[in-house]
Image (tube, rainbow, N blue to C red):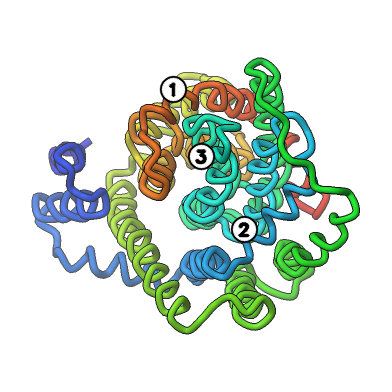
Amino acid sequence: MSLAFTLCLVALFVLAAIGTPIAHSIILSALLYLFVKGQDLGIAAEQISYGLYDSFVLLAVPLFIVAANIMNAGAVTDRLLRFCVALVGRFKGGLGHVNVVASLIFSGMSGSAVADAAGMGKVIIEMMVKDNRYTRGYAAAITAAAATIGPIIPPSIPMVLYALISDTSIGYLFLGGIVPGLLMGVVLMAMNTYISHKRGFASDEVVPLREIPKLTVQAFPALLMPIILLYGIYGGATTPTEAAAVAAAYALFLAAFFYRALSLKKLRAVMLESVKSSASVGLVIGGALILNYIVASENIPKLLADAMVGMNISPMAFLLGVNVLLLLLGCILDASTIILVIVPLFVVAAKALGIDLIHFGVVVVVNCMIGLITPPYGILLFVINATTGIPLIEMIREIGPFLIALLIALALLIFFPQLVLWLPMMFGYVG
């Protein structure tokens, strides 16, 4: 490792530690590397331009963000929630189950945990704390935990980013996320059932069975979106990027014309918010493209891969070590930074050790999503705090059991790769 690369890493961590936005920290430290090495600083712009121009798949990111924001603003989520209440609200801990099932459905539309927590999360938390049926902390904690499912079930923005840095198929990654996403939903609902019985939470108001067909019809157009997306991608009608455009257009049609709940004023606000979110992700991607060029120049991935093979480390030991590291990093870094900056260091080593990159990618994304609710950073906790005003300390007190449930799901995915690879193989994936 050269002096320039050492200075680059030191600058990156120092800048991040003093509160500099992570995207700016990456770009400034990368520029420092180029300066110390005596290379043209224009290489930075060249890497960003080439990386963005050559990655058509990145267009999916802002399109999925737009789709999620339109649904949140256009009352689509309200109809989905009423449908979920009718479906599972009758069981013990009903609104907790509603929270998880709603996230499972919404995850098939947005691909963003933050969109799930900020949009649907606020509504379901208000429902849960009404009449003191659930504590504020518990409602916020299960909402944050359920939102982690969003980027696992397709579509998924983090999986698009992983495909960018690993050169794997987005279609197979999306398929690989379906069973893990459902598994996460099951363990969260099981934990909610256990806690509800232990604490004696009162039963929630039961929606009469006769109303379920009506609520299903109202929610049906929104429920069609995941089906349209998956059929478009796996039926060969669209690429994943084109499917993202279809999702945004379909969300706009539902909100503006079918449900008539999206005015021009709201649409303008949605687009502005989407631009801000896309720009934030874009800056991190730009910085990561430069940093990845530097890492490749230093030959770090190959050196790491050779070291792992030379140590005769087993694939399972490697997987466990990487996951422990990512869980620790998830406490202080956001998912996009981990996937774009940290994960590329391990992709070559994983391939050299014979680890399937689809399995590795899905496990990495699940790991990063758990990081979103892990104190002290836990961005989803901050999002819910900002949208509801519930103190962080109340959420942190309640998040533990759900973290344990999700870690159990992660362990199952690590030790049983077929949970990830079964569906991709059903559609022709050969590894």
Mark 3 = which residue? 144
Q: Which-is-in-front pick, marks 2 and 1?
A: 1
Structural distance between the alpha carbons of marks 3 and 2? 19 Å
Structural distance between the alpha carbons of marks 2 and 1? 31 Å
Q: Position of residue 386 (x, y in %)?
A: 36, 47
Can residue 64 be seen here? yes
Residue visible at 64% across and 21% down in the picture: 195
Mark 1 = which residue? 397
What's under tag 2, amino acid-wise? Pro
State the residue lying farthest toward the top.
198
Give the mark nearer the N terminus: 3 vs 2. Answer: 3
Q: Position of residue 224 (x, y in %)?
A: 76, 66
Q: Position of residue 87 (x, y in %)?
A: 80, 47
Q: Which-is-in-front pick, marks 1 and 3?
A: 1
> Helix, strand, or loop for circle 1?
helix
Viewer-side residue, 354 vs 409 = 409
User: 312 above or below 363?
Assistant: above
Marks 2/1 in contact by CB < 8 Å: the verdict is no
Q: Which image quarter: residue 255?
A: bottom right
Question: What is the crowding at mark 1: few (fewer than 14 residues within 10 Å), some, or many (at least 20)?
Answer: few
Horizontal side of residue 314 vs 210, given as left or right: left
> Helix, strand, or loop for circle 2?
loop
Q: Position of residue 222 (x, y in %)?
A: 71, 66
Give the mark nearer the N terminus: 2 vs 1. Answer: 2
Structural distance between the alpha carbons of marks 1 and 3? 13 Å
Give the mark nearer the N terminus: 1 vs 3. Answer: 3
What's under tag 1, amino acid-wise? Arg
> Helix, strand, or loop for circle 3?
helix
Mark 2 = which residue? 155
User: 32 above or below 362?
Assistant: below
Residue visible at 38% across and 63% down in the picture: 277
**Quarter of the C terminus within the rendering:** top right
